[in-house]
Image: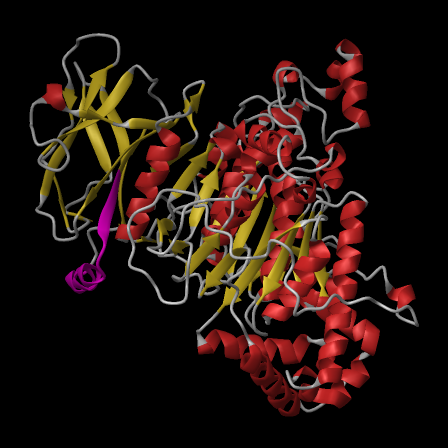
Amino acid sequence: MGTGASRNPDSSSHGSEERDQAGGQLYVSLRMENYKLNGDIIPHVYGSVPLVGSWDPSKALSLEREYTSMWILSFVVPPNHDTLDFKFLLKPKYCSSPCIVEEGPNRQLTAGTLHGDGRSAMFKLSGDEVFEYRVFINVDRVSPFDLAASWRAYQENLQPSTVRGIPDISINSAAEAGPENGSSASLELDLEHYVVPAPAMAANSALVYAANMTETPTSLSRFGGMEVIVPDPTAPPSGSGMIESKSVGTFSSMQKQEGHRGIFVDRGVGSPRLVKSASAASFTADLKLYSEAKNSMPAAAGAVAAAAVADQMLGPKEDRHLAIVLVGLPARGKTFTAAKLTRYLRWLGHETKHFNVGKYRRLKHGINQVCQLTADFFRGDNPEGLEARNEVAALAMEDMISWMQEGGQVGIFDATNSTRNRRNMLMKMAEGKCKIIFLETICNDQQIIERNIRLKVQQSPDYAEEPDFEAGYHDFKHRLENYDKVYEPVEEGSYIKMIDMVSGHGGQIQVNNISGYLPGRIVFFLVNTHLTPRPILLTRHGESRDNVRGRIGGDSVLSDTGELYAKKLANFVEKRLKNERAASIWTSTLQRSIITASPIVGFPKIQWRALDEINAGACDGMNYEEIKRNMPEEYQSRNKDKLRYRYPRGESYLDVIQRLEPVIIELERQRAPVVVVSHQAVLRALYAYFADRPLQEIPHIEMPLHTIIEIQMGVSGVQEKRYKLMD
């Protein structure tokens, strides 16, 4: 949602004027809290527009239960709304007894500010008995885009799909204003006091040049003297003429844009919009992708796996393997995009490898030689340099195809591939062996290009032995100019063009001749990815009573230790994200997760059913000793293969991964920090995605209680930091 801005009677008029000028809408949340009452009495609200528009108690709106003691009602009003008059009342749930209206004058809310002292609501019953509720009235300013995104998530996820009455996503909490946490939960001012060492993992790869983390050439032994046959790049491959476009998605009319054909995705601040260009033609050829049984998508419940299996049953032989061939000028984010896509596909269970041609060039010709040749090595009119670069590209392509023939499924071929001749050479090598989809990255933002150039000079082994940064900088700029002189945009075959998308603030994706499950998933992932730096904080819920008893599953509340952690977590989030008011808190729908996040104030909260703990099915509520004693075969099966083992009438880790894919896409789409309060199995799967850990390691990843894992995402990759708030 938007920026959290809790309002109180002391808010100055000057501050209100500033907020009014900020635009957007006001997201108002009314909360009532009482620890003593049961669920037979339900709080309601009635009053003027836009709350109810009637002072008739029979038309009062009920508040929804947020958890055991808290009730909530949320609505949206414009910043300059008329004064809202309203009062709370109590209605019995199962009888027609009279309503009980709160004591005192009407409550008034103007421009998000509550007038008077409204922190409690008193209800007088028969005799001298009085009920008292604590009242929280909070306001967030949300942009129209955030509001539309929330409504879309509600329509697509909350209404159509529920399990046991639990919605898939519940956006039902806004910024809160609550009491100060007790001193027993206070944190040291220096958060570094709580930092603990993180395990060695791929998430620290931001400290390493990304291209060096790619596939190591298997053809190194051939570099000494074996001749590499490079196909004639000027000879087009058979059937390489322009294939007319098949579109994917919902279309509306769009004005033709010069030089681009196919499908455009307009990347605005909200969700992407797919439209078909005026020049797009009808579909004439189909791509059907499937793989060998050993490399197929892991068996998992749901339509996602079903779609993958359906695709695997059709298609010509060469389409069993997919090559994503990067195209673009240097410093356009190709290697970063390739690394993210590789990590995503591996996490979904597809055998994927990243082949970087620059790494082949350095190993074949040596860093020193490249430095001596400088930018002239990359001139289009340098026949020796052109031959050498085509040679290493052919070596990398040959390695990738050999790997596919041994069982690989998706190869990411990372190079400039900036001319039609080079791409023709690659398509000729791939004929009858794999399907090629070109992925072209286009960036016209000079600030981003300049930043990428400087990072390249600082990190690339090409300039490791160049002590003068400015000399390396000017050499790389000259190299870029040489590429730019001969650059030819992709217009052939199947392709995806990412146009000005790296910033995450707009841009387009153009798609031509793309169909099938896996290519479709790739397009959807690329639409939602960007380079905006932001932290993602992962933490398990506080210790629950079932944790103390050693029981799995269930929906128990927190232990005393867990409640203390919830307060410490709230303090941590307040200090860590004090300048990030657009951040949000994500929880599961299980009460131990919701209660852990409840003391966190000032941020909107979203409940995801996808973040619920792994479903233990028939073993829910048991401990492992009971499973071993009463279900020995299940116990042994689980120990043999924890990744694929599925609890009777429950889930496996692979099932959890499949239901977490929408969460991953949304995390990639977010531009503000996110705090995820979830469960051990779920966080193992999420962490494995960011850390690029193999699937088989997921069930064994350490995910301790009362520890926060901060994943920092940005242009240089992914880094990890851990904070242990309690032992």
714, 488: nearer the viewer:
488
Residue 612 falls left or right of residue 161: right
Q: Quadrant of residue 659?
A: top right
Residue 675 falls left or right of residue 633: left
Q: Position of residue 10 (x, y in %)?
A: 21, 55
Regarding residue 703, the answer to whether it shows in the image is no
Q: How many marks?
A: 0
Q: Identify which residue is drawn at 63% across, 63% down.
A: 236
656, 47: nearer the viewer:
656
Q: Identify which residue is drawn at 43% across, 46% down.
A: 247
How are the colours assigned in the image?
Answer: secondary structure
Q: Where is residue 331 in the image (x, y as percent from the top left)?
A: 57, 74
In the displayed structure, 386 sits above or below 1; it is below
681, 222: nearer the viewer:
222
- Residue 24 forms part of the magenta stretch: yes
In the displayed structure, 200 sits above or below 559; it is below
- Residue 613 forms part of the magenta stretch: no
Looking at the rendered image, the quarter that the C terminus falls into is top right
668, 635: nearer the viewer:
668
Q: Where is residue 686 in the image (x, y as percent from the top left)?
A: 60, 43
Regarding residue 539, the answer to whether it shows in the image is yes
Q: Where is residue 644 in the image (x, y as percent from the top left)?
A: 72, 28
Residues in magenta?
12-29
In the displayed structure, 518 sits above or below 386; it is above
Residue 557 falls left or right of residue 656: left
Q: Identify which residue is drawn at 35% across, 50% down.
A: 275
